[in-house]
Image: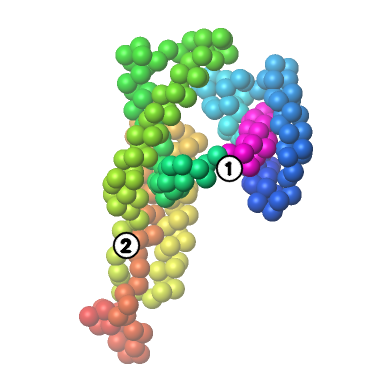
Amino acid sequence: MNYFFCWAAIYQLGIAWHGGLLRRRLLASMAVAAAVALPLLVALGPYPIAMIGVPGDRVQNSTPPSVALLALATLQIGVLFAVAPALNRLLTRGRWPRVISIANNNVMALYLWQMIPVIVVTLVGYPTGLLHQPPIGSGLWWLARLEWELVLAVVTVILLGLLSWRRSLFAAPLPTFAAPVRESVSLAALYLGTAACAVSLGVIAATGFAPNGRFPVVPVVLFAAGALLVAVGPRDTFVDTPGRTPAQQAS
C-alpha cells in the first residue's frame, strides 16, 4: 500500500496545484513541516539518509516508498510551487522561452533515456577515481552530492542537445506492422502486450538486471514478446467477408 499512498499523495498535490487550491502560505507551511519531519525521521526513525535503495540497508526509502521519501517530496514540491510564479516571470524573458520550448519538446525522450548518462558517468567516474564515494551521511558525502548535481547537470544539457538534434532517432515511436487480424484482436494484443511488458519490467525492478550474476532470460523474452504484441495492428484492407478464410481476405 505504500506505493499507492506515497505516489498518490504526490499526484494529488499536482492536481491541487493545477486547480489553484494550493496557496503560497499553505505551500510554505507544507515545506516547513516536511523540513522538520524529514531529519527527525532519519535521525530517530528507521529510515536511512539515502532516498534511493542502497544495498545492505535493512529499510529502503524507495522500495517501497517510505514516509521519509514522502516528506522529501513534500518539501521539494512546497518550495518549488511557492517560487513557481517568480520563476515563470523570469523564464518568459530573453532566450529562456526558446530554451524551455526545446526542453519541453524532448522531455519525454529525456525521461526515457535519463539512466544512460547516469550509467556512463558511473562507469567512467568511479573506476577512475574521478568520483569519490565517502561514507554515506558524512560531510564529504554531502559535498559529493553537489559534485554529482553539477556533473549530471552538464550531462543533461548535452543529452537534451543530442535528443533535439536527432529527435527522429531517439524519440521515434515503436515500429508497428500490419497483420490480417480484426481490430478487436489487435486491441486484445495491445492490452496483453502492455501487461507482459509491465510484468517483465516489474520482475527486473524487483530482482535486478542480473540476479545471482545471471542474465534475466525469462523477463527479457517476456518483454520482447510483449513489445511484439503491442506492435501488431490490423490491415486497413482487411474486410470480414463471410465464406472467406483470413488468408484469402488478407490477400
- In the image, taking residue 241 as reference, residue 82 lies left or right, namely right
Q: Would residue 68 be counted in the magenta stretch?
A: yes
Amino acid under disc 2: Thr
Q: Return the x and y of residue 190 as percentages of the image width and height.
A: 43, 62
175 w.r.t. 233: above or below: above
Q: Return the x and y of residue 188 as percentages of the image width and height.
A: 45, 66
Q: Which residue is mark 2?
A: 176
Q: Which residues lie in the magenta part? A: 66-88
Q: Would residue 217 be counted in the magenta stretch?
A: no
Determine the CA span between mark 1 and mark 2: 43 Å
Residue 155: image quadrant is top left
Amino acid under disc 1: Arg
Q: Return the x and y of residue 161 as percentages of the image width and height.
A: 34, 40
Q: Please, what secondary structure does the residue beneath circle 2 have?
A: loop
| Residue found farthest to the left | 251
Give the image's coloring scheme.
rainbow
49 w.r.t. 168: above or below: above
At 74% across and 28% down in the image, what residue appears?
32
Residue 246: image quadrant is bottom left
Q: Nearer the viewer, residue 10 or 179?
A: 10
Q: Earlier in the sequence, mark 1 or mark 2?
A: 1
Q: Is residue 127 visible?
A: yes
Q: Please, what secondary structure does the residue beneath circle 1 have?
A: helix
Q: Which residue is mark 1?
A: 89
